[in-house]
Image (spheres, grey):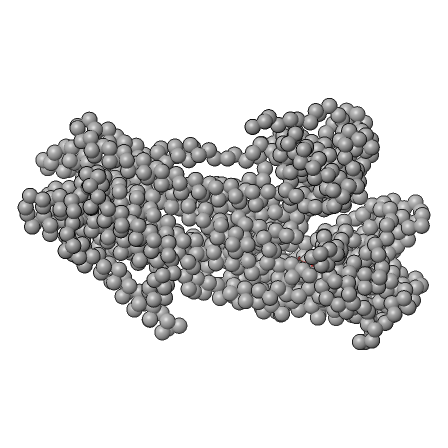
Amino acid sequence: MAKKKTLENKYDWAALKIEDVIQTLKTDPEKGLSSEEAEKRLKKYGLNRLQKYKKVKWYEVLIRQFVDILIIILLIAAGIAFAIGEVGDALTILAIVVLNGILGFVQEWKAEKAIEALQKMLSPKAKVIRDGKQIEIDSKYIVPGDIVVLQIGDKVPADLRLIEAVNLKADESPLTGESVPVHKSVEPVKPGTPLAAKSSMVWMGTSIVNGVGKGVVVATGMETEFGKIAKLTQTVEIKPTPLQRKLAVLGKQLGAISIAISVIVAVVGWIAGKPLLEMFMTGVSLAVAVVPEGLPAVVTITLALGVKAMVRRKVLLRRLQAAEALGSAQVICTDKTGTLTKNEMTVRKIWLPCCEIEATGYGYDPAGHFEIKGKKIDYHKYPDLLELLKTGMICNHAKLIHDEKGWHIQGEPTEAALIVAAYKAWLSVPDLRHYTEFSFNSIRKRMTVIVDEDGKKVAYTKGAPEVIIERCSKILENGKERPLTEEDKQRFIKAYKQMAENGLRTLALAKRVLPENIKLTEDEVEKDLTLLGVVGMIDPPRPEVPPAIELAKKAGIKVIMITGDAPETALAIAKKIGLPAKKAVLGEDLKSMSDKELKELLKEDVIFARTTPENKLRIVTVLQKEGLIVGMTGDGVNDAPALKKADIGIAMGLRGTDVAKEAADVILLDDNFASIIGGVEEGRRQYDNIQKFVRYLLSSNTGEVTAIFLNVIVGGPLILLPVQILWMNLITDGMTAVALGVEPAEKGIMERPPRSPKEHILDWKGIAMIVFLGSYIGLATLWLFHHYLEKGGAEAVATAQTVAFTGIIILEKMNVFNFRSLVAPMKVIGFLSNPWLLLAWTVTVGSQVAAVYVPFLQDALHTVPLKLEDWALIFAVAVPIFLVVELYKILRWRKANKNA
Ligand code: ATP
């Protein structure tokens, strides 16, 4: 691979004039680079990413398969077998170890690949201008000279020299540790200014917390300041999940037990006069029998397949353990706009001091007109309406686009809806010079843009009605400004509340011609405004949401709406989607509430409105103190703390800011509440299935230990040879267990309460089931073995061993059906509902047939051919293990459903 060329870092970009930067980098501030040029530069400078996330190398995964204490014991056993001349056994053990290594490798490698694919999906995006058009691309394709568009909430994708900045502020804490946002401007700085003071630059890895801007890329990838100091960002955290950790502990415990049992049995047997070698091999068999060797690989592959299954549910995991947490979610705090509703805004009503106007039309298509009481009006005759619509257009960052795909938008739907409304009066976006802007965020709940209009500075403001009215001292009526009276205020409040009660999202608009020498700060500008009116937008609920709410209710999950919107709107929407909500509490009211009061409040059917991110954080904290597993959605720059604090931070994939996404555990690809509930169901399914195969594998192992152990006590030849145990544990059980991992969700999975976070992977019921079924397997095998031994004859031992070996495998294969559900009988599950399991079953039983009849496998596994009646007897002994449990399940199922 060609070595990446670096851009000579000889320029002090921050100190250069914009024109010089543009010229040096041979780009165009309006049109950006052409695609061909970008392609060329990509080849020259390489991808814009920090050191590649650490890719796991294939040989590392392969080596991992062999550095297992058990495998090492086996290798020693193979060595000893070889030393004493049992070359065949030694080779078989080696072959099985290698085969197991390869199987484990293939599975884990697939898991790694799945995680890598996930990394790719997570790769950050950036808005750039290329070929004269603003497009969104993967940040890694950004090249020096690209023009990047920035807005509040964006993660800066590379080092940029600013060429436009409107009240732009960046959080540079990841780079400099400075937690106060830094003001940015396009003015060149003095040469040699230290990094933290280079206000004309924004740096990769930092984020925009206010304003809008544009910059030219001057450095990418490892050439950026961040690249110089940082090692890794944007990675899926691949820490072991709590479940994997619990299983690792279980594995260690079993390992210790296995060594203890093996040593005791071997020593006792030897003292009782058995040959040392035979007892050594028995010890090894036991050790192999106790430990479920396939378990770690099966868990890894199941979690990795689970990642894909989650993506099908539109849930992207940023951390593997999030699936488990989702499965046990007890409370889900969700925002409203875009998650419960479609976030497709259409202005329906406009209140002006003179009158109430309705807008017709649908969606983003600007076809439509204005009406008063059902009669079309001539908007030219309503100057106040035109002023309000104009304000909505100026105080706006969205774009309305018309192309072959029809009408669609870029930016915020709330803002786009205002443009659509203005288009209905044939207005177009005025081209004005922007002085500065005070961005919208969910704390301010308003936005102001200051522009130059005929030589005057004019502020155009929009925001939540109660926030705007506080800052108004005048009102516009019939084209004239006059002081705002108390009566005006009351009419205004009544109007917006009425809109909100009908589920409309409300937004007030205001403007102010600013005095000549005013300081352009929020406090100075956003006061003495002239109120223009209120708009009410519909934002219909998503059709999938009411059934999802219903499902959550059945699943014992409490859903709490926490919205920035008005309480009346929130209640109206809650009603539409079937969310039980008796009252809406304002974020502000939480301030005066103690934690105890909030705790009590949270037990009621309550929703929260006009909240700030700080409120969200407090709600999560109080819920978690109650020991609840909490999911919390978020999208804004300020949501990061709440998302991090929640057990499951859920960021919105479409409308979420980079900052929110980075703080979250999962990303909703479609922003849809229903997908969260889908994710919960998927998480529950995965956890269920892991429980199923853990129990299945352990019951198999218990069966093997029981058979070997009792056989030592009863006396006689070895019942199962080490190679045979290896064969069944490593080869046949692993495959069936993986197939159990893809078992579909059980019926009623969402009708039971969430799992308690304290629950162990193995409860007493589970242990009882393992012991019972394990004992059956062990005893039945022992019986088969001794039944054949008693027949006597030259071949008796070899036949008995083959029957025991085949018998235990068939018993385990019949037993697997018991674990397809821990409660439901086969009729409910559907015998054919998991074709993978049937395939694994057929393959493993088929390989056992091969083990008995194919000559080289006969040699390797010490088997002899079986007769048909032997098979018949084996099945006769094996089938009841399924029938007994099935009968038990049927009876219990009937009883439970009768009671229900
Ligand atoms: P949720 O928190 O459920 O997503 P939300 O989107 O309504 O709800 P915020 O984004 O915090 O919450 O908005 C709160 C209020 O601020 C809105 O009801 C609206 O009145 C106002 N608002 C929303 N977007 C803008 C904007 N771009 N400019 C000015 N004001 C806005």
Residue nearer the viewer, 251 or 111: 111
Residue 522, can we see it?
Answer: yes
309 sits left or right of 790 in the view: right
Q: Residue at x 77, y 60 (%)?
A: 420
Residue at screen point 43% across, 59% down? 745
Q: Check the picture and name the quadrant holding the N terminus.
A: top right
Residue 159 appears in the figure: no
Q: Name the residue at 28% across, 55% down.
A: 815
Tell me the quarter of the image containing the C terminus: bottom left
Residue 636 vs residue 654, the one in the foreground: 654
- Count of numbered labels shown in the rendering: 0
Residue situated furthest left in the rendering? 793
In percent of width and height, residue 22 lies at 79, 33
Q: Nearer the viewer, residue 636 or 7?
A: 7
The answer to whether residue 84 is above or below residue 843 is above
Picture coordinates of residue 554 (x, y %)? Answer: 49, 66
What percent of the width, then of the height, locates residue 28?
Answer: 78, 37
Ligand 1 lies in quarter:
bottom right
Residue at image position (6%, 43%) is 794
Q: Position of residue 348 (x, y in %)?
A: 76, 67
